[in-house]
Amino acid sequence: MKKISELGITGKKLLIEGIAFLIAGVLLLIYGPSFPELMLRLFLTFLWARELWNFLFRWFSKAAAKDPLWLNVAKFFLYGFLAGNQFFISLPIAIVSILMGLNEVMKAATSGVTYYIYVKDGIRPRLRLLIDTIWLSVVGVATLLALGGDGNLQMFFLALYFIGLGTSNIRDGWFFEAEVGKKVLRRRLRRGMPLVLAAIIPRVTLQKINDALELGEGETASEIYDRSKENAEPNLEMFIHVTKDGFGAIGHVDLCYKGRIISFGNYDTNSERLFGAMGDGVLFSADREKYIEFCKRENHKTLLGYGLALSPEQLAAVDKEIAKLMSLTVPWDPPQMVKPKHPGIDKEEPMYAYKLKQEADALLYKFTSSKFKTYFVMSTNCVLLADTIVGTAGTDILSARGFISPGTYQNYLDKEFERPHSLVVTKRVYQ
């Protein structure tokens, strides 16, 4: 029985996708907005010609007469009008430019906040963050203010993105069957999908699981999802957390090593700032089984587990990185209750970190230095800490700017599992 976690990724498919993205990127680089406008105009002209064909031969062919005559005529005039209307042809370019402008403004804000955190905590190097903040702000704001422009600048950036994505896919397709990453510890730059699209991947996966359970005949989530490679013996596990609603739909990442969960986040609720997006960075270690049950019971979470089979050399690198991180921390004993923002008005609630300690045997720590001293949801987050540890085993760098979402990481792990000789050897769901 085919599992819903099967993606159907092959080396040939990745090569074809990579070549297509590369060609599209080069054509965008050469012709700018004229290329997508021409493609859209040709597509509409094709639809117009098809309706003309259906009109002329509707009395001789059943296939040509599948639509009522009035609909056939309406489509003919509509497609003809749109194909000759420059405003409509240019509209997709304007929409893409606006979306890219918003994306650049968001990245500028993320770089700016991260730069502030690095200055406050004395973290270096940080100059690149300041430069990114300035140039992304200028480009993003200029794009949003010049909505009537020709879109050449944004098409240039889109072309570079397509070329980078195509190159990554071609490389992945070419080495799809190769036994790389097992012995050599190396990291490579990888061009991923936009943050907005990556953010919805965990929620989409959860929806697929729930839909399959509703249509199934008594199967459990594990029966329709779990997969493992032959002779799979994982010695490290990555977890992607996801909830149906709320902020948890974007996801959370932690890992399990030697029977203990290692997680990072803004678990000191009393230190929250910027609407909960920033706060003291807290790392905790918890019992695996108790933690999984706690997550399912407390937050109604679904956990997607990815088992990695690491070599002794890679395990030694992971041990070294964990020891390095722990040397930068001090134990933290969470209070039982969250301080109300408005004493006497707001209701006191138990702190999540305190529950972790009581119900999952969690040991909690705060950082005294390093980029993890302050948690920020868009950069110094749970994914960055997990990738800092697992990255020592040779996983690819997922972002040139260091901004990685749980969805980006899940997408990477999914693709790695499809490769026959990768580090990822199991996929499981805990619901």
Image (tube, rainbow, N blue to C red):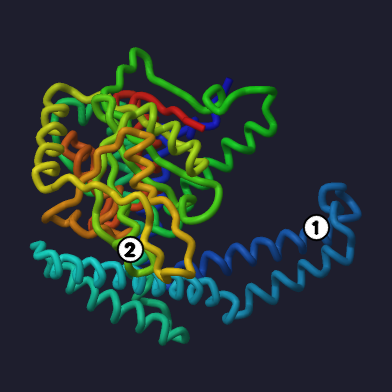
User: Amino acid type of disc 1?
Assistant: Asn
Q: Position of residue 89 (x, y in %)?
A: 56, 75
- Which residue in the protein does label 1 denote? 54
Up/down of 185 relative to 48, above or below: above
Q: Which image quadrant for residue 124?
A: bottom left
- Label disc, if present, on residue 272 of the rendered structure: 2
Element class at badge 1:
helix
Element class at badge 2:
loop
Q: Is residue 19 visible?
A: no
Residue at (58% x, 20% y) in the render = 1
Q: Is residue 430 left or right of residue 166?
A: right
- Label disc, if present, on residue 406 of the rendered structure: none
Q: Distance from label 2 to label 1 (Cα)? A: 63 Å
**Disc 2 residue crowd, few under 14, some 14–19, many 20+, Cα 10 Å:** some
- Residue found farthest to the front: 344
Q: Is residue 83 visible?
A: yes
Q: Is residue 283 left or right of residue 316?
A: right
Up/down of 421 relative to 203, above or below: above
Residue at (41% x, 73% y) in the render = 102
Nearest to N terminus: mark 2 or mark 1: 1
Q: Which image quadrant for residue 138?
A: bottom left
